[in-house]
Image (cartoon, rainbow, N blue to C red):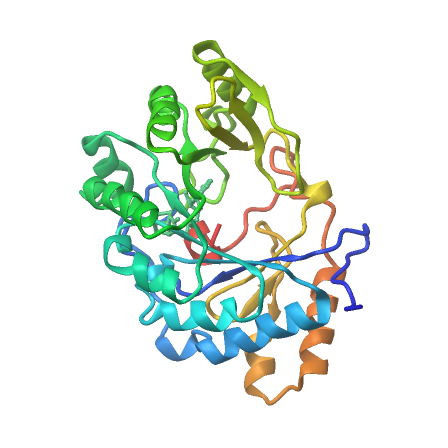
Amino acid sequence: MARQLIDSYGRVHRDLRISVTDRCNFRCQYCMPAEGLDWLPREELLTFEEIERLARVLVERFGVDNIRLTGGEPTVRANLAVLVEKLAALDVDLSITTNGTTLPALADSLVEAGLKRINVSLDSLRADRFLELTRRDELDKVLAGIDAAIAAGLAPVKVNAVMMRGINDDELLDFARFGRDKGVTVRFIEFMPLDAEGRWTNETVVTLDEIVRRIGDEFPIEPVERTSAPATRYRYSDGGGEFGVIASVTQAFCESCDRVRLTADGQFRNCLFAVDETDLRSLLRSGADDDALAAALAAGVASKWAGHQINQVHFIRPRRSMSQIGG
Ligand code: SAM
Ligand code: SF4
């Protein structure tokens, strides 16, 4: 039996998020400054071989069974399918979170490489608002990307929508209808204080309670039993599929969090909001063996805090923005 990645609160970690690049073809308002960020130099990014090695240690030594590739925009990293093939061979539940724009070109090759499911981020169904939010006029490309993912056989296809008061919360029911019509699961995400421009306030968060009430007023819904996944799920009683809410702010799931993160430059984070990181890239590049990597990973998790404490006076905003951590 593998050892476990366990922290001092007894939480066992099996879910790994890997950011494969800090670059992105969008500049979403809540994620990146308009002028973009200074991209990491190529040599600072982990290579596919380095990513595979760390993932293998986490899977084989610690029983990690869930890997999600993210970014920046993961699909702008050249030859992503090569990495997908390497990670799919580890026999884990492998997925990608993407803005969807490249899927018309890439979906088939990702499926051939072994990808089974995908999450596409989309925060407005209105072209003018989409342009304002992402600073790119590419709503049509994202919609085509969702269709391409469905056609390529990825299942489930989930659509992630960050709900922000006064910005896109009037589209809540449009998103619910979109999910029902397309047969995709929409997951509404509470806005988190990781936006690069620091616009987040408590009032901008559209809460789980409000989302469920407003959708429930329109469609009959019933709760789906909770799993370890962070989404609170509901199904439409008429068979129209389901939706989820990721209530990271109002109902933090820190007490059951089983997630660890690897940034594109090889820093290991034990929490989305962590202020400290473990420098795995230096270890890898100084010739560390798997035992040394495993020891660093175990120590990195052991020191995890109880929870992120958004809304409390001692909450500290992480130095990195969401695009640099990976969501
Ligand atoms: N570029 C890819 C994408 O957009 O799906 C992957 C990276 S992105 C940082 C991952 C997720 O984080 C996206 O679903 C995005 O909507 C979400 N996100 C970014 N900033 C956020 C914030 N301040 N609060 C909540 N979610 C956020
Ligand atoms: Fe790019 Fe995704 Fe951030 Fe938007 S949310 S700027 S698509 S990384």
Quarter of the rendering occupied by the N terminus: bottom right
- The answer to whether residue 166 of the structure is visible from this angle is no
**x%, y% of residue 270?**
64, 57
x 72%, y 55%: residue: 304
In this view, the residue farthest toward the bottom is 287
Compared to 150, does 219 lie above or below? above
**x%, y% of residue 143?**
25, 41
Q: Is residue 144 left or right of residue 107?
A: left
**x%, y% of residue 56?**
60, 73
- The answer to whether residue 300 of the structure is visible from this angle is yes
Q: Is residue 293 left or right of residue 147?
A: right
x 77%, y 59%: residue: 6
**x%, y% of residue 144?**
23, 44
Q: Is residue 100 left or right of residue 311?
A: left
Compared to 186, does 82 lie above or below? below
Q: Nearer the viewer, residue 249 or 187?
A: 187
Residue 150 sits in which quadrant? top left
Question: How many numbered marks does the figure carry?
Answer: 0
In this view, the residue farthest toward the top is 217
Q: Nearer the viewer, residue 25 or 151?
A: 151
x 57%, y 51%: residue: 272
x 60%, y 46%: residue: 316
